[in-house]
Amino acid sequence: MRRRAHGLCATGCEHRGCSVKRTASPGRQSRTGRPSAATVKGGDRKRCTAQPRLALLALVCVLAAGGTPAPNSPLRQLRFSPNGRYILAQDSSEIAVLTAQPLAVVFRIPAGEASDAQFTPDSLQIVFVNSGTRTDPEPVLHVRSWPRVEHWTIADQTHAESPEMRGSACRAQELSPDGGTLACTDAQGTLRILDTASGETVFQESQFVRLIPLYSHLPDGAVDLPSGNFLGDLGQSSIDFSPDGRFLIARPSGGHGKPLAWDLNQKSTVDLKGKVREIAGGSCVFLAPHRLLVPAPLYQASHGVVTAKLTAFPSSETLAKLKLPAGHLFRAADPAFVLIRPFGRGAWWNPNATRVAAADVRTGQVIISDTPALDVLGRYYVAEPSAGMVGLYERGKGLRATLAVHER
């Protein structure tokens, strides 16, 4: 079977290994632009299918030997700072902080047990949750241990740690953009919102995630009484903060339950209205303060495309309707774009899918990468043209600079 060459393209290019497309309405074909020199070619790369234990064992061996990550270690994510001056490149063991122009490494942060790192809104710090793993005896699960939040100041390359966030270990968690608030769900389905400076819980919702009961079926097809069995994962939820850190919205993706929104300034819940109340079975992401993108559920996708509504938050007023590639949504640095990961028809059901796309919510055009590391800000986007390599691109003009992250 022929494999596609790894690469990605800027607006207006067409190549067998990558393309820019306009999201089509159901029944309408996608369009590609004219050829351009913006294509980046590279050799085929192996998909990373190692199990977490093997990855952890490999990392322990590297650290014990006093070495550095492998030079071709694939990147987990790339992110622009809000002011566009910096880029963070994160893999399984460290975070490299880069200047965008010129593309160069400023310093490195050891982060073998870190969550996805992010820049603070003022672009002065990088924050992330650092936590190991431990075993919960009831039930026996390998879960995150007590998390700590790390704040790294870019100017002097120093860092400070928060107190341990005590309580039941987090199964799913998300950190606010300024690193001051941590939201998480535990193995019992409880949602907690914690102040990271004190470690205190400021809000708690028991049974935020509830298992789905299964029912017995009679021979004639009728539904009988509950069977006593349940389906779901109490620890699974989806949590997103607005870019300014004002709001968070959480939904119980592991089972039954209602979405919940929290106002960090007022320290109170937010009354959800309209379609926003129905996102428990779908997905949503803040593109900007007071701007929430709510797509239709994935099962309603037609030809790999879903309808989405850009809504004002918290009023739920519909601002625009648009078509998007079906998939899980993530915020890009540029509020005019949204990241879809994984990307491709049916890719959301494939645990090994790695492609990602950045979709322009104004035009429907998408930038496609074969690896998960991709971000967009203004005229530029950053991606991984080959394993462990950072590429800076200008939309419409192509590759501007490359840097091997692990070169010393």
Image (cartoon, rainbow, N blue to C red):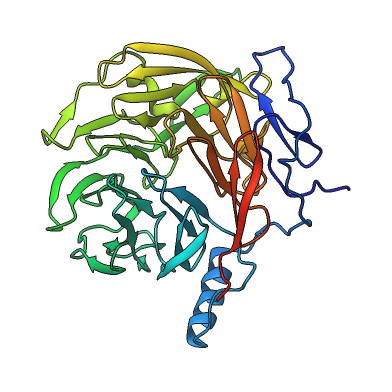
Q: Left of 96 or right of it: where is 241?
A: left
Point out residue 83 in the picture as x, y percentages from the top left corner.
Answer: 36, 44
Q: Residue at position x 30%, y 49% from top?
A: 120
Residue 354 appears in the rendering: no
Whole-percent x, y for residue 250 in the image: 32, 35
Q: Residue furthest bottom?
A: 65
Q: Quadrant of residue 356?
A: top right
Quarter of the C terminus within the rendering: bottom right
| For residue 362, side relative to residue 303 (left or right) | left
Tell me residue 238's x, y (percent): 39, 39
| Vertical order, 262 against 167 (above or below) | above
In this view, the residue farthest toward the front is 102
The spot of residue 242 in percent (x, y) is: 30, 35
**For this view, does 151 lie left or right of residue 17?**
left
Let me know if residue 332 appears in the view: yes
Q: Give the residue displayed 12% in from the left and 54% down from the top.
A: 200
Of 54 and 129, the residue lying toward us: 129
Q: Nearer the viewer, residue 378 or 183?
A: 378
Total marks shown come to: 0
Quarter of the rendering containing residue 365: top right
Image quarter of residue 270: top left
Image position of 51 (left or right of 194) = right
At x 40%, y 36%, the residue is 255
